[in-house]
Image (cartoon, rainbow, N blue to C red):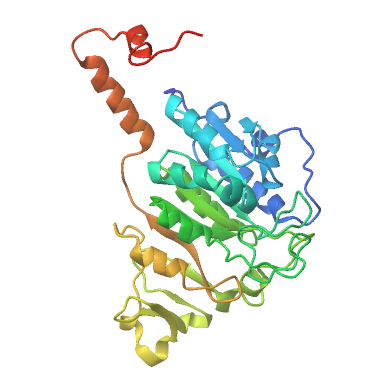
Amino acid sequence: MTDLAVPVTTRKDWASDQDVRWCPGCGDYSILAAMQLLLPDLGVRRENTVFVSGIGCAARFPYYMNTYGMHSIHGRAPAIATGLAVSRPDLDIFVVSGDGDALSIGGNHLIHALRRNVNITILLFNNQIYGLTKGQYSPTSEVGKVTKSTPFGSLDTPFNPVSLALGAEASFVARTHDMDRKHMQEMFRRAHEHKGAALVEVYQNCNVFNDGAFDQVTGRATREEMLIPLEHGKPIRFGAEGHKGVVMNDQGQLSIVEVEGVGEDALVIHDERRADPGLAFALSRLALGPHEPTPMGVFRAVERPDYGSQMDAQLLEASSRKGPGDLAALLSSGTTWTV
């Protein structure tokens, strides 16, 4: 990275000259605005910032950013971003993907980028539907979802993106929603500051094919009683004046109680830095879907070496060993064929 001071920018500097072409009312507009307003405060340069996407509505994101970017192929954005992150550790790399793009054809690429702890920030827009291809069910659609591709209702158990990421040993996992710009920006900031693979699930409304999917938890009238804020080092409380809380039984199962009935000392203290992901995973399973009280915030933020740094260390060690390398001999070693 250059030692020169990062120039002062505004949202206008980060917005491209392309017309934004999402459906009017789409939650993607809110996410785009949150990112463009946040970037001037992150201390990053436009020429060192890259957005990589796959296929889908969310994948149009790079067109609207005045940065480097790549609209890649379906599901492969994490793989392309991995190569870029390893070869150019000086860059700030964001992956933008939808629930279909990331969790269906791109599922393997996603989990391996997370387990390897590649230094990228993954924003997973979850609207529980395929929007670009006109309303088929996705890997996060609820059981019984009636769509063009499931006219009698989906039979598939949906993925929980946060649970999936934690199971893949992601070192940073968070959740936010498109109705709260301030919270989105804080989650994006935290994810960017994290060294290693960071995943942020964003509940994003598709007002054409799955309108209101998250209204029961993110609607203004219900939000206070349905969103559970996760704050490191604090008891997990929510609701008007914090009247509800989360407790854990002897089997490690979490449940929601009235604080008045158990006392604050009985509540779970959130620990996002806990090495064992068990508590974070239990929190991710607290809600069976976006119709029950749902945790929002950072589930896990732990430190471990990122993939690129470890690869650089291996190459440095290899180059310091005595004796010259012979690439031709390596390529022709073992069984060979003449074509």
What residue is rendered at 52% in x and 36% in y? 79
What residue is rendered at 70% in x and 38% in y? 64
Residue furthest to the bottom in view is 261
Q: Position of residue 339 (x, y in %)?
A: 51, 9
Left or right of 318? Residue 13 is right
The reply to whether residue 217 is visible in this rendering is yes
68 relative to 109, above or below: above
Q: Position of residue 196 (x, y in %)?
A: 40, 42
282 relative to 192, above or below: below
Left or right of 249? Residue 191 is right
What residue is rendered at 60% in x and 42% in y? 75
Q: Position of residue 164 (x, y in %)?
A: 47, 57
Front residue (pair 184, 80): 80
43 relative to 58, above or below: above
Front residue (pair 323, 26): 323
What residue is rendered at 61% in x and 58% in y? 139
Q: How many marks?
A: 0
- The quadrant the N terminus occupies is top left
206 relative to 75, above or below: below
The reply to whether residue 7 is visible in this rendering is no
Q: Position of residue 165 (x, y in %)?
A: 46, 54
